[in-house]
Amino acid sequence: MDPDLSRLDDYLADADLDGYLVNASAEDATQRYLSGFSAPDPYTTLYTAEGDTHLLVSGLEYGRAKKEARGGAERPTDYDRRAKVEEYGPTEGGHRVVAEWLVDKGVDSVATPSRFPLGLADGLRGLDVDVTADHDDVVEQVRAVKTEAEIDNVREAQEANEKAMATAERMLREADPDVDGVLHLDGEVLTSERIQQEIEVTLLREGCALNETIVACGAQAADPHERGHGPLYEDEAIIVDIFPRSKATGYYADMTRTFVVGEPSDTIAEWYDLTADALDAALAELEAGVSGSVVHGAACDVYEDAGLPTLRADESAETGFIHSTGHGVGLDIHEYPRLSTQENELEAGMVVTVEPGLYDPDVGGVRIEDIVVVREDGYENLTRYDRSLVVD
């Protein structure tokens, strides 16, 4: 998959820079995107104003990089690293290797992501390389518009995600409450941790992994990013939010459902219906050319019309709708654009979540989240999983 880097080309031309430099592991989405290569340790990628990609990798990764990376690969040993380290020490010697490599590529001015290592930037500047921090994160803007191949990667991750969600819902369906309302499954207390573990096992079998997931019950669900812990209870809202990453492609998916085993309170039932309406209202606004703030506003309108607080109406609100409506998804789980009060024009090919919700520690929490593709005349919903509050 070769990305369209014309926007990066324009950025370099407008700034009169020779290239764009990244130093990070492939856990950094910009690194993986530009290099087309994945390695666990930091390596250096240069994208030149001429449209060429070059990698500087350790000998450990050199063989793979030559076969897998988007551009050519070289090693620090190709630039006399050992001699430089002996003369200048490991830090300056390493900086001199990168500087010589840049000169070899005809580059003496570069932009870098804003999170580029400060030590390397200072070292290169001391060796007469002009280093400019790209505070606008132009590559993140480029990454936001996905090719159809990238969208397929997200779609495949979402298919795995839905199997994991089905695992969680099945466990809840098969659980029985004791006299205190604590759910039990197969003779053992059903906990957040137990469901999280089974979600992870399901995803591993589907070629995906995740560092953590959310299974939060009752008051825990009133904190949008509380991972959840301890026993699960009947009649309480249980938020299940799963965001796996494909081990093969590196692309994420994201989905949330809220379940109740038993009878939801009147408030939770009302909140669920309002949140479903807010989700549908936001989806109805989605199309290329619309600002993310318009989509966010549609969700806020539903809640505010029902007399519930939102951050849009009150920046100090601690209950109600206390987060944005959505975010981009790709090689990062949270990336550009934002569906929030921030103005950013949506473009065809962007993949975003739409995830309104309501929260109050005295009640619990409700959130419903789909993942969709922005299209010229609307959207394509990659989520096929049913919405249903009560687990039957």
Image: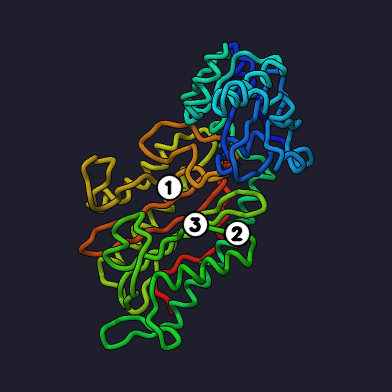
Task: Identify the residue position indicated by label 3 in the image.
Answer: 211
In this view of the protein, can residue 7 be seen by the observer? no
Tag 1 residue: 282
Residue at 49%, 20% in the rendered image: 122
The label shown at residue 154 is none
Looking at the rendered image, the disc whose residue lies closer to the viewer, 3 or 2, is: 3
Q: CA distance from mark 1 to mark 3?
A: 29 Å
Please tell me how crowded label 1 is: few (under 14), some (14-19), or many (20+) other residues with Cα within 10 Å: many
Amino acid tagged 3: Asn
- Report helix, strand or loop for mark 2: strand
Tell me whether the residue at label 2 lies in contact with that at label 1, contact meaning CB atoms closer than 8 angstroms: no
The kind of residue tagged 2 is Cys
Seen in the picture, residue 138 relative to 214 is either above or below; the reply is above
Q: What's the mark number on residue 208?
A: 2
Name which residue lies at 49% across and 26% down: 119
Query: Is 225 left, or right, of 77 in this rendering?
Result: left
